[in-house]
Amino acid sequence: MFAKRLKRLETAMDEAARYEEWTLAAIKHDEESGAARWKQIDQSSRYDFVSIRSRLEHLRSLRDRRDDEGLLFALNEGIHGNMGGMGASPLYGKAKFGTKKLIEDYVEEIALALEHLASPEVDTISFEDKLDFFQRASHCFGRSALMMSGSGTLLYFHLGVAKALWHEGLLPSIISGSSGGALVGSIVCTSTDEQLDELLDPETLPALDDPKGLINRVLSRFKTERITADDIWEVLEEFLPDCTFDEAFRLTGRHMNVSVAPAENHQKSRLLNADTSPNVFMREAVLASTAIPGFFPSVVLMAKNDKGERQAYHSSRKWVDGSISEDLPAKRLARLYGVNHYIVSQTNPYVIPFIDTTKRKTDAVSELKYAVIDTARTWINAGAAIFEKPLGVVPEVQRLTNSALSLMNQSYVGDITISPLKKLHNPLRALSWRTREEIHALIDEGQRSTWPRIERVRVQTRISRTLDPILHSYEEQHIEEFGKPGKQRKVRGSPATRRKAS
């Protein structure tokens, strides 16, 4: 009887039309399974609950007593997302909804303390001291980013992920993408908040107005002939405004990062964005990111010159799909924006055997599988090193080998990885056209795959979502008063600061 009740609730979760419905079924499931009781108990070997509980009580006491200087001092001791190991994945897999109440209470208390110190009623601490603290806190805690993998025509899954995060107010302002992920990310980062609500509705997407509409007409050509750059360009003109990365950032305050790779050997991949390549046009960047070698021609990027005219960006160089060399540019996002928390929407069907095993399961069968994969990866890399010179005799073979090794050796997961719950997709159809029904199914799958991770995202980003607007507000005030953003410790890429400074 117990198992049947749980099964009915799991069915209700699977059939939920909205996240609110899914949440009600998930909470009920936790009550039935005993996970709700687990959440209420602090103790666990997975994290340092004693330290977290002690710090929570101390911060609450300081805020209740209005000891603002003491509260600032206590917070200065360190704000980070993995205090006492509270970010450990197992803590978010026990229950269907949420995690330990102690963790949620601690994170909420930090956020409340930050909001309290930022308020005008705290007048015993100077504006400069507050600004200095919020800049340091933001730098130490870091920021979150959404990284969307190469996907081909599975890009609609990414759209569903973005939709689910957006509707819960959890969509990061820092986004990266390659191939299909670059297209979805660029659409999001060139749309205002008001436009996003309509855009993320599947019924309003231009591609869905007609089963034989633009995208499906273009993609269906894979059945008979190779798609051309002109065909893809039509799609980009339909979806994206003709703007540069900097212009898109000024419009939305969102940072889009597009992964591209040089078509030539011995060149490093690039991450195009408003900081590294502000004048590059996004359409050409996305076109390059979708240029899968062997299927599409390489692309010359275009940029706006000092007169506002369109011209070639590095005219001697052409670019291709960035997922080949760097599908998920975590290290570069860390350097550019202080990102240390990654939400990954992963749909690349060609990388599944090589997924990073750092988040792996610990059962015997899984461990054996991972051992085989790790051993195979080691032998392949060793063989490639041994035969490097013979392979170099034929440049085409060398390029193919280098691409294969790059794909195999990358990491394809993040702190939170969202991938399809259902095995809907044949890798051989990654470049095939999608019917209206399939597009709906992919968007729906993206949402449903995100729902079980929503509360983890909410908890792990609560502090950064609190810090960002506070810091932006304080830096704006500082600019208005002094004409500069304060000390150079500011978070790189702050939308408010960038817009004001420009």
Image: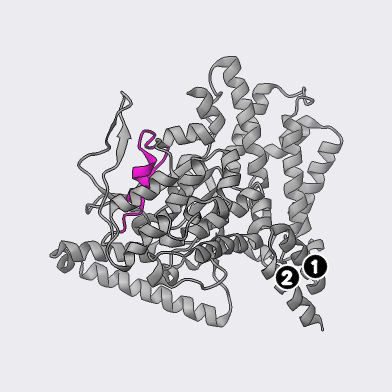
Residue positioned most to the right: 65
Q: Is residue 329 visible?
A: no
Left or right: 304 with respect to 397? right
Which residue is depicted at the point 75% across and 58% down?
Answer: 49
Are dots 1 and 2 in contact, CB under 8 Å?
yes
Residue 409 coordinates in the image, percent (x, y): 38, 64
Residue 378 placement: quadrant:
bottom left
Instruction: Name the outermost residue toward the left.
Output: 393
In reply to whether residue 220 is colored magenta, the answer given is: no
Label for residue 12? Answer: 2
Picture coordinates of residue 489, whole percent (x, y): 54, 31
Please state which amino acid type lies under the numbered disc 1. Answer: Lys
Up-down relation of residue 141 to residue 321 (above or below): above
Please give the name of the residue rendered at 78% of the width and 51% of the height, measured from the top-left corner.
105
Q: Which region of the structure is painted magenta?
A: 271-292
Q: Nearer the viewer, residue 320 or 184?
A: 184
Who's the residue at 41% across and 56% down the image? 215
Say the numbered circle drawn on residue 28.
Answer: 1
Q: CA distance from mark 1 to mark 2?
A: 10 Å
Which secondary structure lies at badge 2?
Answer: helix
